[in-house]
Image (cartoon, rainbow, N blue to C red):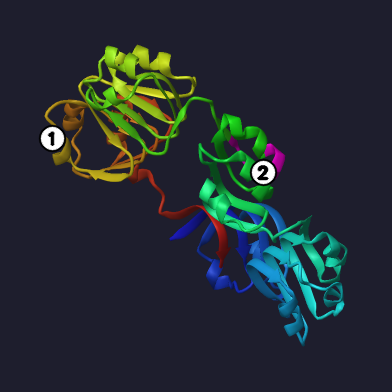
């Protein structure tokens, strides 16, 4: 079976052979390709759409992925030449002496960033000879790296013993009660390779500290409460709210017994980048409460089914439903081979596809197209799928 791959950050061909690449049908985009001189010919044998950078790695070089810390002890321990291709980050610690960088024993090729104290930045070219390098200087503590999701809270700031240079690879959020005066004291610089979510009154503090933001800044308006998980309320639970303003990236669901009066009393505004599900009797009010035109408001007549994860439904599951439903797929729904058109026609009023629906054949797909109300996702028949394995996005791939 051939394999198609979407986007690859780093494609490592250093140990690749004709055998290891023969199943690869196509790679769409590659940020960087690493290869040895003896297998450079494999690059032309691969069907690759776009390539950002190619780097030839000589035989006497070792590949190093991640963060390489150069300190006084490490440099003193080198007695023979060390040659490294660093795919990541190099941090030169403050205890390094300028003369240690001039021994000629350490030879680096760098694809990434090099952080150096200001007084050592001029000597960086003594050890970094080649590569695609972005040199940055830092004062105070060496940069601290956080990967994934990081929430800056008062406890996080209090744990920092000295002003910090913070590099976040992922999602950065600010807690609502964050002490911004302490934030200004404890954070020297911010580098963000990802998105930021913070409150309106914190925005100016972010830009004072941020030297780079490679993503989107999402600002929660003043007076709004951030929802970190889906909100589902009924006629009883909604009574705990009074003129609330909600900001959310998760679904908001109103049960059938949420009346117009209850809704108006409980909520004054919803800022949603996800979807809102409500009974058709309150649809007009929900539209009035939403502050974004792109918010998807989906209604139901009696009952609804929301698919969030990955589910497989059989004919018997549809038969078991006592009345027709509005079906909303926000994850992945796989319809089993035994699905009957007559049962779907009886049990499903409308189908909203925001994720992916896999059906057994073209006939089933054709019927479902007649009841689709919203389709921003994928509807696919299994019988038309090619026998091709696929990977969408890969950070590092070794063949």
Residue 275 on image: x %, y %: 39, 28
Residue drawn where x is 54% and y is 38% of the image: 197
The kind of secondary structure element at disc 2 is helix
Q: In the figure, is residue 253 to the left or right of 319?
A: right
Give the residue number, with chain letter if any, for mark 1: 319
Question: In which quarter of the view is residue 32 placed?
Answer: bottom right
Q: Residues within 10 Å of mark 2 (few under 14, many from 20)?
A: some
Residue 94 on image: x %, y %: 76, 67
Residue drawn where x is 75% and y is 80% of the image: 82
- Any part of residue 206 in sight: yes
Circle nearer the viewer, 1 or 2: 2
> Where does the N terminus fall, quadrant-wise?
bottom left
As for residue 108 lying within the magenta part, the answer is no
Q: Residues within 10 Å of mark 1 (few under 14, many from 20)?
A: some
> Where does the C terminus fall, quadrant-wise?
bottom right
Q: Is residue 267 above or below residue 188?
A: above
Question: In which quarter of the view is residue 62 placed?
Answer: bottom right
The tag on residue 281 is none
For marks 1 and 2, the one nearer the N-term is 2
Q: CA distance from mark 1 to mark 2?
A: 61 Å
The tag on residue 184 is 2
Count the marks: 2
Q: In the figure, is residue 176 to the left or right of 255?
A: right
Q: In the figure, is residue 300 to the left or right of 384?
A: left
Q: Pick whichever, 386 or 260, lies toward us.
A: 260
The span picked out in magenta is 207-217
- The residue lying furthest to the bottom in this view is 79
């Amino acid at each position: 079976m051939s394999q198609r791959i979407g986007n690859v950050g780093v494609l490592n061909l250093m140990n690749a052979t004709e055998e290891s690449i023969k199943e690869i049908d196509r790679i769409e985009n590659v940020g960087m390709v690493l290869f040895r001189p003896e297998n450079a010919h494999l690059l032309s044998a691969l069907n690759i759409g776009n390539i950002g950078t190619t780097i030839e790695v000589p035989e006497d070089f070792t590949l190093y992925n991640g963060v390489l810390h150069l300190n006084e002890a490490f440099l003193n321990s080198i007695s023979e030449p060390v040659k490294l291709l660093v795919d990541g980050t190099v941090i030169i610690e403050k205890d390094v002496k300028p003369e240690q960088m001039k021994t000629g024993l350490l030879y680096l090729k760098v694809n990434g960033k090099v952080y150096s104290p200001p007084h050592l930045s001029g000597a960086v070219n003594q050890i970094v000879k080649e590569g695609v390098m972005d040199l940055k200087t830092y004062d105070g503590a060496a940069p601290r790296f956080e990967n994934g999701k990081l929430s800056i809270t008062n406890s996080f700031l209090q744990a920092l013993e000295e002003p910090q240079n913070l590099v976040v690879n992922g999602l950065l959020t600010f807690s609502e009660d964050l002490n911004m005066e302490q934030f200004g004291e404890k954070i020297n610089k911010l580098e963000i390779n990802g998105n930021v979510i913070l409150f309106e009154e914190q925005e100016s503090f972010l830009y004072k500290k941020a030297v780079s933001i490679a993503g989107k800044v999402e600002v929660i308006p003043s007076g709004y409460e951030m929802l970190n998980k889906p909100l589902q309320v009924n006629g009883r639970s909604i009574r705990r709210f009074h003129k609330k303003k909600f900001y959310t990236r998760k679904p908001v669901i109103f049960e059938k017994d949420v009346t117009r009066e209850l809704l108006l009393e409980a909520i004054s505004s919803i800022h949603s980048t996800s979807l809102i599900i409500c009974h058709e009797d309150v649809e007009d009010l929900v539209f009035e409460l939403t502050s974004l035109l792109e918010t998807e408001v989906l209604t139901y007549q009696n009952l609804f089914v929301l698919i969030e994860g990955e589910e497989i439904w059989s004919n018997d599951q549809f038969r078991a439903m006592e009345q027709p439903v509005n079906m909303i797929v926000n994850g992945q729904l796989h319809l089993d081979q035994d699905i009957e058109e007559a049962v779907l026609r009886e049990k499903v009023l409308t189908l909203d596809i925001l994720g992916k629906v896999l059906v057994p054949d073209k006939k089933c797909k054709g019927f479902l197209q007649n009841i689709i109300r919203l389709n921003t996702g994928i509807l696919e028949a299994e019988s038309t799928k090619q026998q091709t394995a696929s990977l969408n996005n890969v950070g590092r791939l070794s063949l």
